[in-house]
Image (cartoon, rainbow, N blue to C red):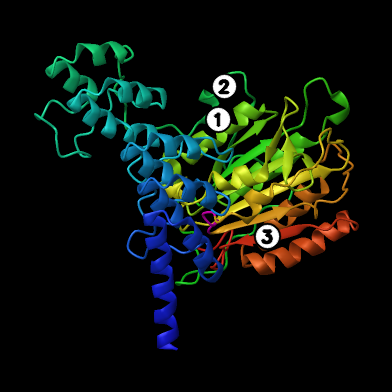
């Protein structure tokens, strides 16, 4: 057994060596045994990271069929980060042209690939190579980004940016290529948890413990849920809830979903009484939805809560996409990816629940359903500590919306009221199924686990 394990490790090392030397034929041969998911033990770099570091263009083009360009190493860096800091511009263009590429992804030091392009830009200013300076600027290099902690050739303590270096060395031709220096406003360290500042026209609902929508009251906690196999939920606030309710749709009154406000009122009441905080938003556009969720991802309050719950109600295209107010379709996968560990370190090792209440089938999707085989088979950063609950299996499910709300949210709230005080998630879910079956016997909800490895209690005793 030991010899076999050693042989396997040696085989993996041979793949990395072949990638570094650009031996594509050998890489393809060895991958038949090792698979594309292998990583360097000390750096957690993938084969794609290695190919990007060594500027192996053919290898990168091949590996992009197998590995996502957004996969990260232990420092939170994508292959684009490594290509950028080394000035591999042609290879970087290949990575950036991938339709799945996240151009705003930040590493553990909060740097994008554009920030790291300032390193080769600084070195090119030092060497006075104007043509390559232009190339880096087109890719987004910032002449005012400080490289003090990134390079060993900083001339003086105050000369830390490519622009400052160009001024000191009197590189007038290079200075003429730089965009005008922008004035950087001083950032404050305080952040707000009130998302109503995003769009003054938005209908934003603040979730607190003051709502009295449900006649039933949440039962007091009776379980002391502690231990290494249980998610910690003894925080104040207990968790953060983000509700996105799409009840109206541009130029399509026939798609209006009656009862959305009742659903939000009931959800706010239940979660508020369990000690959660959060916000609800009504009928956002696709752009506003992305802005709100991105703001939530970066909120300081996530440092202090035990979990995060996201509830989205709309028309669904299967369980894969949902409609926004401006009749655009957003992917549920994009929502989950936004809160994976490398994107949202504030929620790392914390439970993240995504609840999708979709009316499937009533809205007729005008474009053919397409599944990207490259996306589905690529090695990607796995989702961790996530659970997704869908109101149906994705087949035709058309709810009768009433002023009282949907059967799914009604059953969800009732089960939280009656069972959240002493039931672990799996046991709670069984009780929820019973309640949901009473209200909608033909519906088949779906629960999907993504690295949710511990026991979870919505409302345990602190």
Count residues near mark 3 (Cα–Cα under 10 Å), then give few for <14, some for 14-19, many for 20+: few
Badge 2 vs badge 1, beta-carbon distance below 8 Å: yes
Count residues near mark 2 (Cα–Cα under 10 Å), then give few for <14, some for 14-19, many for 20+: few
Magenta span: chief secondary structure: loop
Which one is in front in this view, the residue at disc 2 or the one at disc 1? 1
Mark 2 and mark 3: Cα distance apart in space: 33 Å
Badge 3 vs badge 1, beta-carbon distance below 8 Å: no
Residue range corresponding to the magenta coloring: 380-384
Which one is in front in this view, the residue at disc 2 or the one at disc 3? 3
Q: Which residue is mark 2?
A: 199
Count residues near mark 1 (Cα–Cα under 10 Å), then give few for <14, some for 14-19, many for 20+: some
Mark 3 and mark 1: Cα distance apart in space: 26 Å
Give the image location of residue 258, x and y in percent: 83, 33
Q: Which mark is residue 291?
A: 1
* Relative horizontal placement of residue 436, taking residue 304 as reference (left or right): right
Q: Residue at x 66, y 37 (%)?
A: 244
Q: Which one is in front, 149 or 123?
A: 123
Q: Residue furthest bottom?
A: 1
Residue 235 visible: no
Badge 2 vs badge 3, beta-carbon distance below 8 Å: no
- First of labels 2, 1 by sequence position: 2
Count of numbered badges drawn on the protein: 3
Q: Which residue is mark 3?
A: 448
Q: Residue at x 62, y 67 (%)?
A: 424
Q: Is residue 159 above or below residue 369?
A: above
């Amino acid at each position: 057994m030991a010899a076999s394990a050693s042989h396997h490790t040696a085989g993996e090392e041979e793949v990395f060596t072949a990638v570094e030397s650009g031996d594509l034929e050998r890489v393809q041969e060895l991958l038949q045994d090792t698979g594309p998911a292998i990583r360097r033990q000390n750096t957690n770099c993938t084969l794609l990271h290695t190919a990007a570091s060594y500027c192996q263009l053919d290898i990168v083009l091949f590996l992009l069929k197998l590995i996502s360009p957004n996969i990260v190493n232990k420092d939170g860096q994508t292959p684009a980060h490594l290509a950028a800091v080394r000035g591999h511009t042609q290879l970087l263009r290949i990575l950036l042209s991938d339709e799945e590429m996240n151009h705003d992804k930040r590493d553990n030091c909060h740097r994008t690939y554009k920030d790291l392009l300032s390193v080769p830009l600084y070195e090119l200013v030092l060497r006075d190579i104007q043509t390559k300076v232009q190339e880096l600027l087109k890719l987004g290099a910032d002449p005012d980004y400080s490289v003090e902690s990134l390079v060993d050739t900083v001339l003086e303590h105050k000369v830390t940016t490519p622009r400052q270096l160009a001024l000191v060395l009197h590189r007038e031709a290079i200075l003429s290529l730089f965009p005008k220096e922008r004035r950087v406003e001083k950032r404050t360290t305080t952040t707000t948890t009130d998302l109503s500042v995003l769009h003054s026209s938005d209908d934003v609902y603040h979730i607190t413990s003051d709502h009295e929508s449900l006649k039933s009251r949440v039962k007091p906690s009776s379980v002391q849920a502690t231990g290494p196999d249980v998610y910690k939920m003894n925080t104040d606030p207990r968790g953060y809830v983000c509700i996105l309710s799409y009840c109206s749709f541009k130029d399509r009154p026939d798609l209006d979903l009656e009862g959305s406000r009742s659903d939000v009122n009931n959800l706010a009441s239940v979660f508020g009484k369990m000690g959660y905080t959060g916000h609800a938003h009504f009928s956002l556009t696709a752009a506003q939805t992305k802005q709100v969720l991105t703001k939530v991802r970066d909120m300081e309050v996530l440092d202090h809560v035990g979990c995060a719950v996201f509830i989205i109600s709309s028309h669904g295209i299967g369980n894969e996409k949902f409609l926004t107010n401006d009749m655009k379709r957003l992917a549920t996968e994009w929502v989950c990816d936004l809160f994976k560990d490398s994107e949202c370190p504030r929620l790392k090792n914390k439970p993240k629940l995504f609840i999708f209440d979709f009316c499937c089938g009533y809205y007729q999707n005008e474009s053919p359903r397409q599944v990207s085989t490259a996306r589905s088979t690529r090695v990607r950063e796995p989702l961790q500590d996530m659970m997704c609950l869908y109101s149906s299996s994705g087949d035709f499910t058309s709810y009768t919306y009433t002023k009282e709300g949907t059967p799914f949210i009604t059953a969800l709230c009732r089960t939280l009221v009656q069972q959240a005080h002493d039931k672990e998630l799996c046991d709670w879910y069984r009780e929820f199924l019973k309640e949901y079956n009473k209200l909608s016997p033909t519906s088949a909800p779906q629960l999907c686990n993504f690295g949710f490895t511990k026991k979870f209690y919505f409302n345990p005793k602190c």
